[in-house]
């Protein structure tokens, strides 16, 4: 939690956790009390309480790692490295998301209206919750990034993870995963990658 909080460019007011024992425990409760953070949780068996977070189980976990069962220290090290570095940067700076603005029932159908697609860092800046210094630090992280280079590094690490899995199990695990073949990203693609301009 300390590492996550250190990386966040905004101030924490509280935590709203899932119901697992990794969250609902004395250690986390005392941490929140000590740091004066409000500690709430979703209701058991009510996934819609955290619907926006639950959908990230697909986009940020299964779509990336697939359904293979990773359990060794070596596999854990690769996954941690991937999420702390390239994947975090790629998702936060180059993957736009659409937020639901309103829902309206028309007869038997529901009409949903979505806002303009924006990346998480754009959403954060538009929220006006960041200090000027935090905005500048965010832009300093963003400017040197190249999405094609990040994607190439992500694919390389995922393929390394699959190879580690196969070596452990002696099976062709790649056939169970979407990354059956590494995507080739040429140096020309990396140099010519279109990068959105900061607002």
Image (spheres, grey):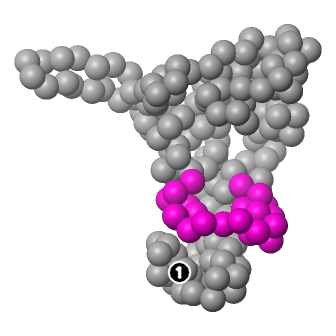
Going 63% across and 89% down the picture, which residue do you hit? 170
- Disc 1: which residue: 174
The span picked out in magenta is 61-83
Element carrying mark 1: helix
Position of 122 relative to 154 (above/below): above
Depth check, front residue: 192 or 120:
120
Depth check, front residue: 56 or 136:
56
Depth check, front residue: 147 or 51:
51
Depth check, front residue: 48 or 11:
48
Position of 25 relative to 146 (above/below): above
Q: Is residue 76 magenta?
A: yes
The prevailing secondary structure element of the residues shown in magenta is helix
- In which quarter of the view is residue 2 placed? top right
**Does residue 8 appear to the left or right of 41 in the view shown?**
right
Going 72% across and 15% down the picture, which residue do you hit? 39
**Does residue 180 appear to the left or right of 162 in the view shown?**
left
Residue 9, given in percent of the width and then of the height, sits at: 79, 31
Q: Residues within 10 Å of mark 1 (few under 14, many from 20)?
A: some
Q: Is residue 68 magenta?
A: yes
Residue furthest left as drawn? 107
- In which quarter of the view is residue 195 placed? bottom right
Image quarter where the C terminus lies is top right
Going 79% across and 47% down the picture, which residue do you hit? 141
Residue 1, given in percent of the width and then of the height, sits at: 82, 34
**Does residue 56 appear to the left or right of 140 in the view shown?**
left
């Amino acid at each position: 939690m300390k590492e996550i909080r250190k990386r966040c460019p905004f101030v924490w007011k509280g935590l709203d956790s899932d119901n697992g024992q990794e969250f609902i425990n004395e250690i986390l409760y005392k941490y929140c009390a000590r740091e004066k953070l409000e500690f709430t949780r979703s209701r058991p068996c009510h996934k819609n309480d955290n619907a926006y977070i639950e959908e990230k189980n697909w986009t940020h976990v299964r779509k990336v790692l697939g359904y293979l069962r990773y359990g060794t220290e070596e596999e854990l090290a690769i996954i941690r490295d991937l999420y702390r570095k390239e994947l975090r940067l790629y998702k936060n700076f180059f993957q736009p998301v659409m937020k639901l603005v309103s829902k309206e029932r028309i007869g038997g159908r529901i009409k949903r209206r979505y806002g303009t697609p924006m990346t998480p860092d754009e959403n954060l800046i538009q929220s006006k919750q960041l200090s000027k210094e935090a905005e500048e630090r965010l832009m300093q992280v963003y400017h040197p990034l190249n999405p094609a280079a990040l994607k190439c590094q992500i694919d390389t690490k995922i393929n390394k993870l699959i190879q580690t899995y196969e070596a452990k199990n002696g099976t062709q695990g790649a056939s169970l995963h979407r990354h059956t073949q590494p995507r080739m990203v040429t140096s020309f693609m990396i140099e010519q990658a279109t990068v959105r301009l900061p607002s």
